[in-house]
Image (spheres, rainbow, N blue to C red):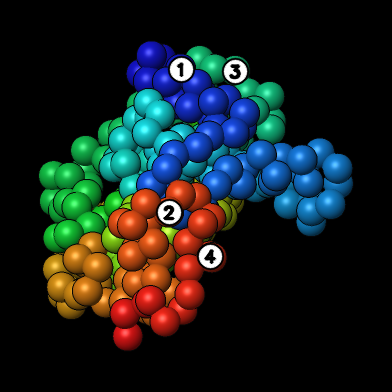
Amino acid sequence: MSELVNIMKSGIRTALKGTRHPSRILGPQSVDFLKNLQSGNLADLGVLNTVILYVTALMEAKSAMEIIVAAPTAGSCGALPGTVIGTADALDIAESRVVRAMMAGGVLGVLIIHNGTFSAEVAGCQAECGSGSGMAAAALVDLLGGTADQALAAASLALQNIFGMVCDPVANRVEVPCLGKNIMAASNALTCANMALSGFDPVIPIDEVIVTMDKVGKSIPHELRCTALGGLSITRTSKLIERALDQGATEGEWKQMPDNKAEE
């Protein structure tokens, strides 16, 4: 796990220097977030701002084909490590505790995969970003010195909040709205961890939540399960971007394509 954490940190550092890839929708944005954060131009969200920065960086590293850890998947690689490492850096928590916390998040992942899935094609984005959020919530509780029961409570709360999250990638690429959903997963994890540490009762045990999440995911229409057949995937702009990128446009160049080339 220590080696995996080092890979995650390397991905963050790499992305914050600026990354490029010819076939992705957006250019590097985490660099600008960092500049604005350092300049005091953003709302003071405390730990969450560092988490947003790290989650965004990891998603950009993924889209630039840098080395990342699928935690639990490539499309949801930002939420768990970005939340845990971001919180640790913001609060000056030792790396040894980060490693332990990531192990705790991994154990929650084992529970999920035993009774569910990490595949968005099977159960929508709740299986990817949703699972990542639950894993991050459990990991955060461990990072902050909570008990195993509190970690499971945090995970239960986090997973309950993401039922029904669809997967509708823009331009058939795992980039938009995946970034925003990873950020949401991280924010959800932070709040649920604090709730659990404060004694909030999730009511429904984690095992029942996981089984129910799987059932809910499989009831989502197939058009909204990473098939690019529904949701944002079939908007005019999504089709425009997809056509432009398929024709060789690079980051941002799709904005120059005339609207009449988009499929209705």
Reading the image, the residue beneath label 4 is 255
- Label 3 residue SS: loop
Q: Position of residue 61 (x, y in %)?
A: 46, 35
Q: Position of residue 44 (x, y in %)?
A: 79, 52
- Label 1 residue SS: helix
Dot 1, how many residues are within 10 Å of its Cα: few (below 14), some (14-19), or many (20+)? few
Mark 3 / mark 2, whichever is N-terminal: 3
Question: What residue is at 33 percent from the left and 57 percent from the top?
Answer: 247
- Label 4 residue SS: helix
Mark 4 / mark 1, whichever is N-terminal: 1
Mark 2 / mark 4, whichever is N-terminal: 2
- Label 2 residue SS: loop
Mark 4 / mark 3, whichever is N-terminal: 3
- Image quarter where the N terminus lies is top left
Q: Mark 3 and mark 1: span between their CA atoms?
A: 13 Å
Q: Position of residue 122 (x, y in %)?
A: 14, 60
Kind of residue at disc 4:
Lys
Question: What residue is at 41 percent from the left and 15 percent from the top?
Answer: 2
Q: Mark 4 and mark 1: span between their CA atoms?
A: 36 Å
Reading the image, the residue beneath label 3 is 94
Reading the image, the residue beneath label 2 is 249
Kind of residue at disc 3:
Ala
Reading the image, the residue beneath label 1 is 6
Kind of residue at disc 2:
Ala
- Image quarter where the C terminus lies is bottom left
Viewer-nearest residue: 125 or 193:
125
Classify 264 as above or below 214: below
Dot 4, how many residues are within 10 Å of its Cα: few (below 14), some (14-19), or many (20+)? some
Q: Position of residue 117 (x, y in %)?
A: 17, 51
Classify 99 as above or below 220: above
Residue 185 visible in the displayed image: no
